[in-house]
Structure formats: structure tokens, C-alpha cells
Image (spheres, rainbow, N blue to C red):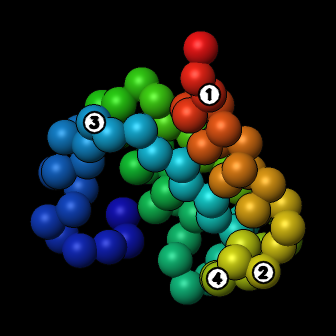
Amino acid sequence: MQGPEWMEPKLPEVTTPFLIIHGEADVVTDPAVSKRLFEVAATEDKTLKLIPGAKHADCFWREESYEKVRQWLATRTQRS
């Protein structure tokens, strides 16, 4: 796994809900890093969205990414 050496052993301790948005064409940070976090994190409330064709930081400029964030937040903040 690419990333700080201390990170991987800590991944099973991640218990907060999270959303990962990662470009499939990212050559700076391998999408496998995000996939590994998703697979290993302890929380049940986790979402991984891979954006086809997006490179490193491209996701910041795509409406598709913002829509995924809006949807993710909306499902967790709806009042009953």
C-alpha cells in the first residue's frame, strides 16, 4: 500500500462514517490505496466512488463529484 507506513495498521480502527471519491486514472495516488481503506476500515457506513477517467485532483472540478457528496450528506442528515 502506498502511504505512510504507520497508516495501514491503523485502518481497522477507522470507525467514523466516510466517503471516498477517487479518480480511476490517478497516477499520483494509486486508487488501490482508497480501495484498501474502504475494505479494511471497521465502520459499516463507508462509501467508495471511483470517477472514471479522473486523474489526481480532477474530482475537485467535476460536478459529478459534488453531486456524490451532496447525496452522501443528504442521506445522513435527513430528519425523520
Q: Which of label 4 and label 1 is nearer to you?
A: 1
Q: Do the residues labelled 4 and 1 touch (CB within 8 Å)?
A: no
Query: Mark 3 to mark 4: distance in Å?
Result: 26 Å
The amino acid type of the residue labelled 2 equals Trp
4 or 2: tag closer to the N-terminus: 4
Instruction: Please determine whether, in this image, residue 29 is positioned above or below residue 44.
Output: below
Q: Quadrant of residue 7?
A: bottom left
Query: Mark 4 to mark 1: distance in Å?
Result: 32 Å
Query: Mark 3 to mark 1: distance in Å?
Result: 21 Å
4 or 1: tag closer to the N-terminus: 4
Q: Name the residue under label 3.
A: 15
**Count of residue discs:** 4
Q: Which secondary structure lies at badge 1?
A: loop
Instruction: Please determine whether, in this image, residue 6 is positioned above or below residue 25.
Output: above
The amino acid type of the residue labelled 3 equals Thr
Q: Mark 4 points at which residue?
A: 56
Q: Quadrant of residue 51?
A: bottom right
3 or 1: tag closer to the N-terminus: 3
**Which percent across, then down, holds residue 20?**
55, 54
Q: How crowded is mark 3: few (under 14 residues within 10 Å), some or many (20 or more)?
A: few
2 or 1: tag closer to the N-terminus: 2
Q: Mark 1 points at which residue?
A: 78
